[in-house]
Amino acid sequence: MSPPDPSGRAPTAPEVDAEPPDTEPPDTAPPDTAPAPPGPAPRRRRRRRRRIVWAVVVVVVLWLAACAVLLAEGLRDASHGASDVQQAKDQLSASDVVSRSATAPLRAAARDFDDAGGFLHSPVLAPLDIVPVIGRQLRSVQDLASGSAQVARIGIGAVDQAHGILHAPHSTGPERVQALRNLATLASGVHSRLVRIDTGPSSALVSPLAAKRATFVHDLDQVEGRLQHASAVAGTLAGILQGPKTYLLLMANNAEMRAGSGNYLEVGALTSSDGALHLSYPEPTADIPLPAGKVTATGDLEARWGWLHPGQDWRNLGFTPQFDVNAALAARMWEAETGQHVDGALSVDVEALHQFLEATGPVTLDNGTTVSADNVVQLLVHDQYEGLSDNLLSPQQDAVEAAREEALGSLAKATLDALQNEPLDLTTLSNAMTSATGGRHLMAWSAAPSAERAWVEGGVSGELSADSAMAAVINRGGNKLDPYLSVSTSLTMTTHGRRTDGVLTVHLANHAPPGQSQFIAGPYPGLGTVYGEYLGVLAVNLPGYASVPRIDGNPPLDALGAEGPTWLVATNVDVKAGDSERFVVRFSIPLAHGGLAVVPTTRLSPVEWTYRGHTHSDAAPFTLSW
């Protein structure tokens, strides 16, 4: 017996196949009987099937056409949005944030990406989601459009909030500190929102889409990094202004160049408290040399440039372009000389003062002289030295020199007072700060590791990286001829398998004019030079992973070896007025692809780099890729 059905129902008979067995039936029809013609029902069924098939084909074709239209419209709007974002990126300097000029392209980008999302998330496209390959591409495009729209909206809010913070009252010290803290909080909050954006699938994408996604992710990472830097810098500045802090102010003159900075000819102490700054009267560094052995350089500075005794003479600090190294040594020298401990150091040169005076307007010195952005460079690199001579040792000469130094101190204090106390155009001030920090005209170092990290992240620390390259000419002639020395380079990079050979050609031309004072054009007593002769050092920095650089002709070298994360090769230059000189530096890099990160030298006439038919100026950092 069969077991009872658990459901309680009576067992049923087994099903029987309705089709006849697959055997040849007996032929029972009469031989003269013809098969009956098919009736109308089978023909109707075939016509119905054909109509259904054609209807399905038409629906599929129309659906595919609708998908194509929606995708085309969505991709078009996404492309417009990407163009708007690029325009916004080009308008995100500090001054653009102040003026909110980036808001319009960001709003346009948000609209375009929202429109793109509307098309790309249409229910018509939903069936594509389940198609293995096509669905992944669609989801990636949808996520990129959605993420881009979020970035645009976050950017609009950030620019509006930053604009509000910067235009709030900040005339007093505490208000300035609070404004910086608000900017730090804003940057940190925007960063937190951006890191949560979903950038969609990253694998198995078609090549064009993968490239677009990679660009979006790279740009988003850059923005996130900059926001981290901005938050750190604003927070650190707020802490410094809140005080009490003391920073050493090193004032560099670009008429007599060092590596990556002018010569540090004046130094003073800058103290802060409750958002206000006070500058002690700057002293000429030539008047405060340190005795031998009291402070000594260490590390690469001592190994490469120790023969110049940078721990004794302030004017020899700048032979390395590493401001973090120069500043740390300067802080030790100041404390040894004055007994005053400093929390950090700032470097300001002639171009930085020019930029600040663009923001403040003219200032009046204690002697009644008016100095403005129009005349400050000419005053500092030339006019203040007219009529001066190193050969004239007399009470009259001493009085002229004392008056000149007094005027320099007065200019520094007047500019600082104007920056603190005068109503300023924030767009102009933002432009000034961007230019000054980007070109190394304003650099900062802190003895506190957390603050120093902020300066590094903010790009104002003056550090070198493993990719850094620089072609600097250091003045050793005791004159002010650098405004008349033109420096240009040409670079070729040739790849051989996994190795790339580089040839850097440096051209120097001395355009010293006649009729200059001995203080400007020399000769400096005891050097054996003649009027207008430029005596100095060519110092070339190259990536530390390159081969040992060499100079054609094997001239005597002043320095060769590691300088921080870079290679340094240096040799003497001696160019008479009206003459020129050329040096060829050869090196090899064990990479088929890479880039040289060119560091500004801060020359008033920037060094020009010619590479692959294009000329670049080192007024700001740039990268040459191969």
Image (cartoon, rainbow, N blue to C red):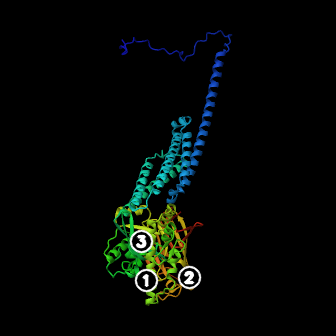
- Amino acid on which disc 1 is placed: Ala
Q: CA distance from mark 2 to mark 1?
A: 27 Å
Rendered-image quadrant of the N terminus: top left
Q: Residue 372 at what x, y percent from top left?
A: 52, 72
Query: What residue does disc 1 label?
Result: 402
Query: What residue does disc 2 label?
Result: 512
Q: Secondary structure at mark 2?
A: loop
Residue placed at 50% from the left, 16% from the top?
17
| Foreground pick, 444 / 371 | 371
Residue placed at 36% from the left, 71% from the top?
328
Q: Secondary structure at mark 3?
A: strand
- Residue 465 in view of the camera: no
Q: CA distance from mark 3 to mark 2?
A: 32 Å
Q: Residue 262 at what x, y percent from top left?
A: 46, 75
Crowd band around label 2 with a 10 angstrom C-alpha radius: few (<14), some (14–19), many (20+): many
Q: Residue 248 at what x, y percent from top left?
A: 38, 71
Residue placed at 62% from the left, 25% from the top?
52
Q: Which mark is residue 563?
A: 3
- Amino acid on which disc 2 is placed: Ala
